[in-house]
Amino acid sequence: MVSVAAVKKKMVKICRECHRVVEGESCAVCGSSNLSTDWTGYLVIIDPQRSEIAKKMNITLPGRYALKVR
């Protein structure tokens, strides 16, 4: 049996360029249409200037991101 969370995860598209969660067919941040549904790790950045993880991932805008995109 497949969990509901696993099904919902696969429906979410992630930009392969900036790792941002995308709604639609292209990334609103970087403009890329290179999207993936194969990803792991969910990250919400609220204050990128104070976040060490955001700095390591070169994230400058608040939002939802994936840690790893395939």
Image (tube, rainbow, N blue to C red):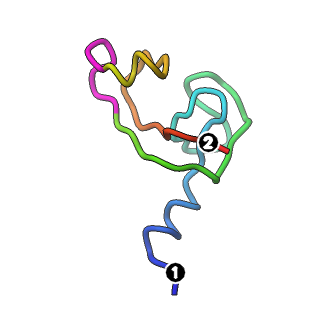
Which residue type carries mark 1?
A: Val
Residue at coordinates 59% horizontally, 42% vertically from top-left?
A: 14
Q: Please identify the quarter of the rendering in which residue 33 is found.
A: top right
Which SS class for mark 1? Answer: loop
Dot 2: few (<14), some (14–19), or many (≥20) neighbours within 10 Å? Answer: many
Q: Quick check: is 2 in the magenta stretch? A: no
How many discs appear? 2
Q: Quick check: is 50 in the magenta stretch? A: yes
Residue at coordinates 49% horizontally, 41% vertically from top-left?
A: 66
Residue at coordinates 61% horizontally, 42% vertically from top-left?
A: 69
Position in image of residue 64 (x %, y %)? 41, 37
Q: Which mark is residue 69?
A: 2
Q: Read off the magenta span.
A: 45-51
Dot 1: few (<14), some (14–19), or many (≥20) neighbours within 10 Å? Answer: few
Residue at coordinates 44% horizontally, 19% vertically from top-left?
A: 56
Q: Residue furthest top?
A: 49
Position in image of residue 25 (x %, y %)? 68, 42
